[in-house]
Amino acid sequence: MKKILVTGGAGYIGSHTVVQLLNSGKDIVILDNLSNSSLGVIKRIEDLTGKAVEFIEGDIRDRALVRATFEQHTFDSVIHFAGLKAVGESEAFPLRYFDNNVSGSIVLFEEMMRANVNQLIFSSSATVYGNPGSVCYTEETPLSPINVYGRTKLMVEDILRDLQKANPALRIALLRYFNPVGAHESGRIGENPFGKPNNLMPFMTQVAIGAQEKLMVYGNDYPTPDGTGLRDYIHVEDLAAGHLAALKALEQNASITVNLGTGKPYSVFDMIKAFEGASGVKIPYEVVTRRAGDLSEYYADPTLAKKVLGWEAQLGIDRMCADSWRWQKNNPKGYS
């Protein structure tokens, strides 16, 4: 049985991926410092899969802990989710983001090399593209991130590309996510942001349960059909499936870089309408001024992911909204 180290495996995307990995017969060890996740998710993963999960609470910057983890287990692969992820926070606290996302990744990669673990899937982001002047992003779109978070993701990508040149035995997949939403169909695991949510869907679900007064719509004067920004939202279950497809594809490909998105953008008003339909709850909102740095529209070209991974998104906007609402309704206080 293949054993995989999943850093950040108690987080939103990590936990959904771990469920699919366990259901596909993989042996998993989770390393997570719980800075943006909850210990409660581990029991729920075990309940959903019927399998025990080895969980190590710790930080990838803790070299002694990371080294001990590799010494105590024989891993075939690492899936690296661990890192801070809020764009606005990254601008306010850049050193914290460079330390966590870049320095932490370097420690992880050094200990991987020391343990002779040569296969990695890295959780990257569409933010590496920045504002390229086009709205449909292919993998050849120029890389020029416009915020600290995106720069940390690009730095780690660059480190891995250079590392692979120096060590051709490495097999590396760089997966660039677009906008993950949704939750496990059971309603047992989902997105559980600490504090006020930064993203549209969790904010909207919290409005629906009364935890937030109203949704802020940042700008309705963009050059889009309804004036609000267009984004490529992807169900977290589709995103998780992309990681399993990447594991299989690395058996035949030493280097993979692909977008994980649907290729179909939706506006803020589209998402509000779909969520109201799925939940039966009217979402009060207020249109306010645009946020600095927000783009009017962007979405993935998922063609290469289908070609290289044999993967494409299966779940549409209605399922995204229904699963998000089921999770929030059943867990109004998250995992607490």
Image: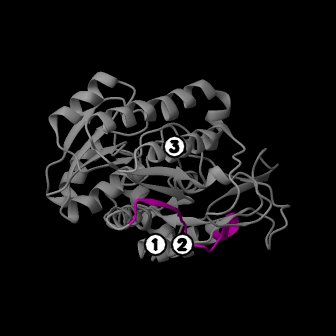
State yes or no: discs 3 and 1 in contact (Cβ < 8 Å).
no
**Magenta part of the protein: which range?**
253-270
Mark sitting earlier along the chain (3/2): 3
- Looking at the image, residue 5 sits to the left or right of residue 246; the answer is left
**Mark 1 highlights which residue?**
308
Residue 77 versus residue 279: which sits nearer the camera?
Answer: 77
Residue 243 vertical position relative to residue 109 in the rendered view, above or below: below
The label shown at residue 162 is 3
Q: CA distance from mark 3 to mark 2?
A: 22 Å
**Mark 2 highlights which residue?**
304
Q: Disc 2 on helix, strand or loop?
A: helix
Q: Is residue 312 visible?
A: no
Residue 123 versus residue 178: which sits nearer the camera?
Answer: 123
Q: Disc 1 on helix, strand or loop?
A: helix
Q: Tell me residue 59's x, y (percent).
A: 36, 29
Residue found 80% across the figure and 69% down from its top: 224
Give the amino acid type for the residue marked by disc 3 in the picture.
Asp
